[in-house]
Image: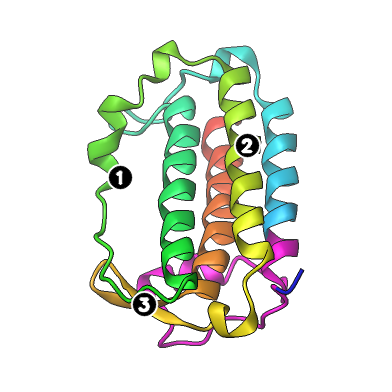
Amino acid sequence: MSATSHRPQPGEYHSYFQRYIDLVPEDQIIGALIHGKHEIQELFHEIPDDRWDYRYAPEKWTLKESLIHLLDTERIMAYRALRIGRHDATPLPGFEQDDYIPYVHALKRTPLSIREEWEAVRDASIHIFMYFDPEDLVFIGNASNHAMSTRALGYILAGHARHHVKVIRTKYLI
């Protein structure tokens, strides 16, 4: 396991992502991703049956939609990390999260299906980062028209999940 990189530095990511990176105290990407996997697994056990289709405000996503958004973002960011970590400098397009929600088909999903998918997707992200060399982690590509390093994407993945854990615990599980 060679992914023992230090924290990403400004200039390796767009300032928008600072809020996610700041949520990650770990100095190693793999440890942060594994911790986040377990944190979400614990969260699944805290969610009562009557909360899965709950939305805390009329225009907000349901709890299921929020968790499926987490899955979509995990896949997109991990794909970006794979491309950039392989030293691919091709500009990678952005995505609009709200445009995805009508097509996640949350009403068709069970809590178990979402939990199992989370475990598989996060495991895949962990495995992507496990074998990057230090020079792969600091390689800077382009995502959403901004500079982005591989290691920044790892921290963004970890911080994005922690952000949603906090939102779910404070807005959905009250």
In screen coordinates, is 163 left or right of 16? right
The front one of 170 and 12 is 12
Q: Which residue is mark 3?
A: 141
| Residue depicted at x 63% and y 18% | 112
Rendered image: mark on residue 136: none
Is residue 36 depicted above or below 87 in this figure? above
| Magenta span | 3-32
Helix, strand or loop at mark 3: strand
**Mark 1 residue element:** helix
Which is closer to the viewer, label 2 or label 1? 2
Going by the image, does 96 lie left or right of 123? Answer: left
Residue 120: mark: 2
Front-most of residues 73 and 142: 142
Residues under labels 2 and 1: Cα distance? 21 Å
Which residue is identified by label 1?
97
Q: CA distance from mark 2 to mark 3?
A: 26 Å
Residue 31 belongs to magenta span: yes
Instruction: Pick whichever of labels 2 and 1 is earlier in the sequence.
Output: 1
